[in-house]
Image: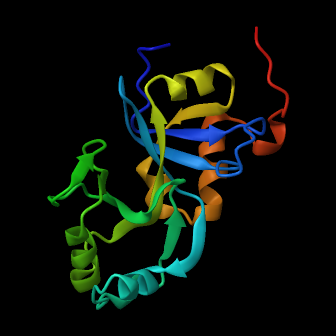
Amino acid sequence: MNSVNLTDNFLIAMPTLEDPYFANALVYICEHNENGALGIIVNRPIDMNLAGLMEKIDISMEAAALADLPVYFGGPVQLDRGFVLHRPVGHWQSTLAVNGEVGLTSSRDVLASVGKEGLPSEIIVTLGYAGWDAGQLEDELAQNSWLTVPAKATILFELPPEERLPAAMQKLGVSFTQLSDVAGHA
């Protein structure tokens, strides 16, 4: 199982996963390698919109069309830092290109562009991220804590947050109600 690479995949938290941070979570894996994994929870909006966040960090919000976008709880690591999942990848100071069309940026320049020009317009802004040490995610997969499914940018950027988990589940051909909260091993 050490050779699995889940970059650009969704993780769907199984009912057996008892960590409250991840209950009913849909996580988009932005990087997965021998050093561990980094992902963003993409279906947990918090009680803050983009305009409110921009005001807190002193960035002008001139792009009114994006002002009401929700900010998300991205995961329990570095809750004081913002991360922007966006399409297209673009050219920002600190961007991890997940694939040819989606990037994850942690530098302020992407937010400044969003505020001034409204670009990139397809964004998910989070506070915090989900992280796993080397081998940790593989262990959780072996314990049946997660389902995995190849990600689709349309699920990320074209669906409202409450529809993302059901859409990812549909790719597997199951609904959340069909999942058992009892783990089994063959």
Q: Residue at point 63% right, 32% down? A: 147
Q: In the image, is residue 3 above or below residue 134?
A: above
Is residue 81 depicted above or below 38 in this figure?
below
The image position of residue 183, as x and y in percent, is 80, 24
In the image, taking residue 111 as reference, residue 22 lies left or right, namely: right
Q: Nearer the viewer, residue 78 or 86?
A: 78
- The mark tally for this picture is 0
Horizontal and vertical percent position of residue 28: 48, 46
Q: Is residue 65 visible?
A: no
140 or 14, nearer to the observer: 140
Picture quadrant of residue 144: top right
On the image, the x and y values in percent for residue 110 come to 24, 69
Task: Give the position of the C terminus as an image quadrant.
Answer: top right
Colour mapping used in the image: rainbow
Question: Which residue occupies 64% across, 33% down?
Answer: 146
> Looking at the image, which residue sits at the far top?
186
Could one spot residue 41 in this view of the protein?
yes
Residue 88 image-quadrant placement: bottom left
Q: At 39% across and 85% down in the image, what residue appears?
A: 56
- Left or right position of 110 against 122: left
Residue 37: image location, x then y, percent: 42, 35
